[in-house]
Image (cartoon, grey):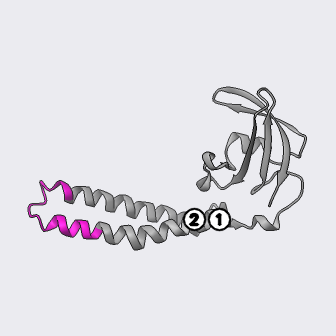
């Protein structure tokens, strides 16, 4: 059975854009670099050729990886979600019960997570602790630095 990969429409579009860039921009650039390096003669001691071939291998592996994920993608339309419980796609505003620091996270697919942008993976400890909770609930999360307590201030899908 093929394991589905949940992702938002935004994450799916970003992944499609990366594949398009790798195929239509990077692939031709690398092929040109290989051709230019070949023109320099002896390939056994040609560092430019070997570097270009490494770039080509990485590029093709990345395309294959992304296409695999896209083929198994289960795109979840967040605009059709709602309610007051936390589930995939939710934007959750939390307050750290120790420091009173607020943070807002959106729960997204594993491959579109980016903590700097406030997007956390559905498989992360904090997301797993938040699933099915409501505004006003407290959650305990085990982090590498020890246990943390958060209170959910807001749950939205907008």
Quadrant (top left/top right/bottom left/bottom right) for the C terminus:
bottom right
Quadrant (top left/top right/bottom left/bottom right) for the N terminus:
bottom right
| Labelled pair 1, 2 in contact (Cβ < 8 Å) | yes
Q: Secondary structure at mark 2?
A: helix
Q: Is the residue 115 above or below the residue 31 in the image?
A: above
Residue carrying label 1: 10
Residue at point 60% right, 56% down? 112
Q: Is the residue 27 above or below the residue 117 in the image?
A: below
Spot occupied by residue 119 in the image (x, y as percentages of width and height) = 66, 50
Residue at point 50% right, 65% down? 18
Residue at point 60% right, 49% down? 114
Closer to us: 103 or 57: 103
**Is residue 14 at least partly visible in the picture?**
yes
Residue at point 72% right, 40% down? 126
For residue 62, side relative to residue 88 (left or right): left
- Disc 2 residue crowd, few under 14, some 14–19, many 20+, Cα 10 Å: few
The alpha-carbon separation of the residues under discs 1 and 2 comes to 6 Å
Q: Is the residue 68 above or below the residue 140 in the image?
A: below
Residue carrying label 2: 14
Spot occupied by residue 49 in the image (x, y as percentages of width and height) = 20, 60
Q: Is the residue 23 above or below the residue 106 in the image?
A: below
Magenta stretch in the rendered image: 31-48
Spot occupied by residue 38 in the image (x, y as percentages of width and height) = 15, 66
């Amino acid at each position: 059975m093929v394991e589905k990969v949940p992702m938002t429409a935004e994450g799916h579009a970003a992944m499609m854009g990366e594949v398009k860039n790798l195929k239509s921009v990077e692939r031709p650039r690398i092929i040109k670099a290989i051709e230019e390096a070949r023109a320099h003669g002896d390939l056994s001691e040609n560092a430019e050729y070997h570097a270009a071939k490494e770039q080509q291998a990485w590029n093709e592996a990345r395309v294959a990886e992304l296409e695999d994920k896209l083929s198994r993608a289960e795109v979840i339309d967040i605009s059709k979600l709602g309610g007051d419980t936390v589930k995939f796609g939710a934007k959750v505003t939390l307050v750290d019960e120790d420091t009173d620091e607020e943070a807002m996270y959106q729960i997204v697919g594993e491959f579109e997570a980016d903590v700097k942008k406030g997007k956390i993976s559905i498989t992360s400890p904090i997301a797993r602790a938040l699933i099915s909770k409501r505004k006003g609930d407290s959650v305990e999360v085990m982090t590498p630095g020890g246990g943390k307590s958060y209170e959910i201030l807001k749950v939205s899908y907008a």
